């Protein structure tokens, strides 16, 4: 039987604060922002630049890491340190930074293609390990940079340049994927909803460990209107659940809510029929992710009916980088950090 060790180390992360008050202007670079006119990335960039001063962190201790894709231009426009890395590997590179530099606030920007195709394995393991990263996943349901091929989140039947007869792939649900990987913080928001986007980023920033925020983002060139029902003022209130911890999970217009059925599953019912007392209360701090996972599955990917937005899960768990730093400190204090002895120990062989 294997032996286990309690690794309940306290956090060693201490990111230096800024010495002077900052504004959104301080986080803007002199680089020309080069996205297609009307792209949802502009709204996200503006929200992030306005939000970052709230953290009060020294800009030289903030790092943005991206992979490949339209979203990956992001570090060029943030007046902090930044890395434009390689396709799908942003979480791996960011993990190395977070583990070796506890004085840094590390953010990842990625897209549905970059994160969920070639980068899928790196993403789920960063989430599983709970490395201290904030990951913004821009989801426009298409490959934009390579000019309009279907992506891992495109709907079944999606007609694109690479699927002229319609996509046969069943798409990923990024929130379900993150919850299945035991992510300690998972949220969803929308590019054009500045208030909701900012509040979601604020909660993610306060979380210790990996925080994944899926952002529904519009590509007006290759997949325009992908999320329009959730943005249309005439329809969004009867399509969207705004998740608030401790509050009943109802549509914005209050007509329908989420209930637990006899078999333990979740479904949407008319509030007038079942009564408000029957509506499930949202518990973002539930250590068991099964309810949050079920909640992530109630929306219709084709019509977008019953789409939850907000924080699905926010639980406390020691971050990987903090426990790693603490374990290294213990090893050094106990004299167990001798690399030469490890390399030339008993389990070595001489080959002639």
Image (tube, rainbow, N blue to C red):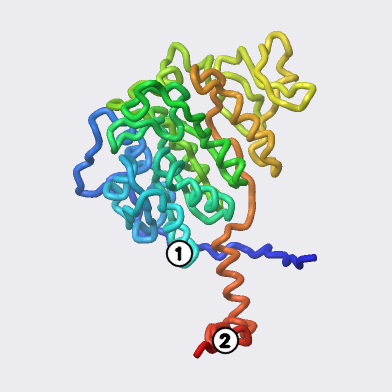
Kindly identify which residue carries mark 1: 103
Which residue is nearer to you in this view: 147 or 300?
A: 147
Q: Position of residue 251 (x, y in %)?
A: 58, 19
Marker disc for residue 255: none
Which residue is at a point 51% across and 43% down the rendered structure image?
212
**Crowdedness of circle 2 by 10 Å Cα count: few (<14), some, many (20+)?**
few
Which residue is nearer to you in this view: 268 or 114?
A: 114
Label 2 and label 1: CA atoms lie apart by 40 Å
235, above or below 263, in the image = above
Marker disc for residue 349: 2
At numbered mark 2, what does the secondary structure look like: helix, strand or loop? loop
Which residue is at a point 53% across and 18% down the rendered structure image?
305
303, above or below 204, in the image = above
32, above or below 195, in the image = below
Q: Position of residue 66 (x, y in %)?
A: 36, 50
Residue 279 falls left or right of residue 76: right
Which residue is at a point 46% across and 62% down the rendered structure image?
96
303, above or below 116, in the image = above
Q: Position of residue 232 (x, y in %)?
A: 41, 16
Q: Which numbered disc, 2 or 1, marks the residue that appears first in the sequence?
A: 1
Q: Find the residue positioned furthest to the front.
A: 352
Which residue is at a point 20% across and 48% down the rendered structure image?
30
At numbered mark 1, what does the secondary structure look like: helix, strand or loop? loop
- In which quadrant of the rendered view does residue 159 lie? top left
Residue 110 falls left or right of residue 330: left
Q: Position of residue 121 (x, y in %)?
A: 50, 49
Mark 2 against mark 1, which lies toward the viewer? 2
**Crowdedness of circle 1 by 10 Å Cα count: few (<14), some, many (20+)?**
some
């Amino acid at each position: 039987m294997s032996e286990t060790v309690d690794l309940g180390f306290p956090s060693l992360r201490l990111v230096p604060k800024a010495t002077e008050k900052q504004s959104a202007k301080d986080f803007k670079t002199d680089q020309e922002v080069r996205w297609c006119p009307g792209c949802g990335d502009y709204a996200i960039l503006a929200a992030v630049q306005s939000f970052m001063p709230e953290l009060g962190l020294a800009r030289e201790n903030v790092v943005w890491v991206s992979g490949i894709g339209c979203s990956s231009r992001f570090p060029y426009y943030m007046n902090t340190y930044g890395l434009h890395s390689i396709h799908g590997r942003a979480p791996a590179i960011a993990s190395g930074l977070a583990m070796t530099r506890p004085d840094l606030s590390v953010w990842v920007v990625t897209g549905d293609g970059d994160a969920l195709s070639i980068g899928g394995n790196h993403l789920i393991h960063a989430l599983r390990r709970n490395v201290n990263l904030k990951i913004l996943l821009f989801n426009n349901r298409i490959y934009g940079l390579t000019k309009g091929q279907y992506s891992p989140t495109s709907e079944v039947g999606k007609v694109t340049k690479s699927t002229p007869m319609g996509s046969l792939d069943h798409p990923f649900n990024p929130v379900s994927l993150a919850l299945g990987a035991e992510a300690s913080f998972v949220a969803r928001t929308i590019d054009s909803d500045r208030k909701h986007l900012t509040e979601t980023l604020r909660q993610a920033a306060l979380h210790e460990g990996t925080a994944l925020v899926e952002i529904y983002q519009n590509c007006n060139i290759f997949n325009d209107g992908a999320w329009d029902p959730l943005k249309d003022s005439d329809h969004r209130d009867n399509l969207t659940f705004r998740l608030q911890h401790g509050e009943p999970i109802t549509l914005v217009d209050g007509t329908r809510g989420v209930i637990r059925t006899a078999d333990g599953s979740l479904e949407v019912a008319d509030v007038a029929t079942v009564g408000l007392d029957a509506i499930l209360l949202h518990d973002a701090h539930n250590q068991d992710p099964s309810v949050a996972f079920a909640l992530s599955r109630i929306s219709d990917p084709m019509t977008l009916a019953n789409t939850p937005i907000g924080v699905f899960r926010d639980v406390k768990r020691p971050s990987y980088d903090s426990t790693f730093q603490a374990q290294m400190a213990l090893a050094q204090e106990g004299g167990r950090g001798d690399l030469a002895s490890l390399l030339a120990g008993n389990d070595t062989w001489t080959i002639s």
